[in-house]
Amino acid sequence: MTMYELIDKKKNGKSLTRDELYYIVNGYTLGNIPDYQMSAFLMAVCFNGMTNDETYYLTMAMKESGDELDLSQVNGTVTDKHSTGGVGDKVSLVMGPMVAACGVPVAKMSGRGLGHTGGTIDKLESFTGFNVSPTDEEFIKNVNEIGISWAGQTANLAPADKKIYALRDVTATVDSIPLIASSIMSKKLASGAEGIVLDVTYGSGAFMKNTEDAVKLAELMIDIGTKEGRKMSAVITNMDEPLGYAVGNSIEVIEAIECLKGNGPEDVMEAAYALGSHMLVLSGKCSDMSLAGEMLQKTIIDKIALKKMAQWVERQGGCSDMVYDTSLFERAKIQDIISFDDEVFENEPQTPLYVSAINGKTVGLAVQVLGGGRSTKDEKIDLSVGVRLLKKTGDTIKKQEPFAIIYANNEKKCETAKKMIKEAFGISSKKPEKTKVIFREIY
């Protein structure tokens, strides 16, 4: 076979075999297939799609292109959770200690943030000294002894995906459901967990913009995982507006700590309880979702999950005092409180007025402008900057009333972000209907 023949085959809407997809993935990873031919193939997939079997073979070829983590030495059934990304998404930081406090091992690999959605690994580095690169031995020892460990994705975990994604990113071939599914699942399967819970987000702050595509993506990933013998479930969550009030790195960690203290925003806790319950059920710890939810709530009420976070941070070299005293986190030099001027309210003379929408993507991009997100994978980010919302959709808003705070270290960037945050907020005399965080759960 030749790459030319396979491009032509996919261009004409025909299905590729397992051997043909392995040929493409291995050939490109080893450098035998040039970028221009791989780009043509990816574009053909974007136009013509893939069958479920094709997507499964593509996933497996990428999974097997590098190292695979062996978690057989971990005591208990390891479950993992993956989010397709969102603005203000600190659910993993809340859910991980909760699940571990229930006696279910959490062995998780996460990535860094790129673009307007933050990465959990970056957020964890807000803890002074936190080591996101433990050895495999340290990683497994931590899970066995304290029930939780977290690490950044190693360079040789699904290297084919890393190389293919870099090409997709510059050839406008990112937005293909089969390519998204295979990219995510190749890494998740290589990470070794027996149960995988998927948080598939949709809305302005997420990659999938509507519920239909989010459900398609979730069902496809569940199909891939099930074929590999993994226990799978998915939760479709709304990301039209940022999750919680904090968007950034250190300020999201602080909000996650508040969640574990019992003071968390309602939307964050709703997502954390739902996803955490799925993890407990997949692990076999609980037989039903309601019992799982009760167990998770008890870890918050009794402060067990908060203690688990402190134990986890200390075990990975971080300063655990920061869990109990959040004033120890690095603070940005500038704090700019935002409110609307009179002109905005002259167009809406009726009272009361309401926040009708908050565009999650715009808020995320504002944080990126401040330096809290990356444009390239190697770019250094500022962990102290971010945006704290003071209002959410449905809240009343008055003239000159503060609705957000910007944390910045540069005046010019602060002014740019300020304009963006104002544009992200919609105001109306009609109170909007409250949207549920959880759209659908797929078992």
Image (cartoon, rainbow, N blue to C red):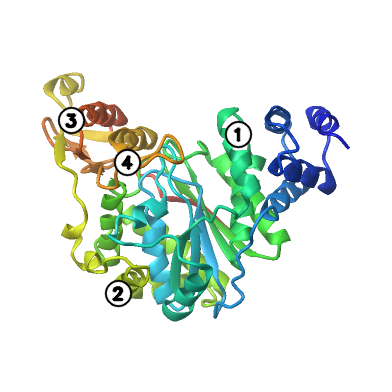
Q: In front: 48, or 165?
A: 165
What's the mark number on residue 372? Answer: 4
Q: Which numbered mark, 3 or 2, is in the foreground of this view?
A: 3
Q: Horizontally, is 159 left or right of 434 in the view?
A: right
Please, what is the three-letter code of the amino acid marked with disc 1? Answer: Arg
Where is residue 93, by image quadrant?
bottom left
Residue 402 location (% of width, % of height): 14, 37
Q: Which element type, helix, strand or loop, lies under badge 3?
A: helix
Front residue (pair 41, 29) = 29
CA gap between label 4 and label 1 equals 24 Å
Q: Which residue is mark 1?
A: 168
Query: In this rendering, would 343 be left or right of 313?
Result: left
User: Mark 3 sits on what residue?
Assistant: 411
Q: Tag 1 or tag 2, which sits nearer the N-term?
A: 1
Using the numbered discs, state the Cα–Cα distance from disc 3 to disc 2 in whole angstroms. Answer: 38 Å
Residue under label 2, please give it: 307
Q: Residue at x 59, y 39 (%)?
A: 165
Nearest to the observer: residue 271 or residue 404: 404
Q: Residue furthest front?
A: 31
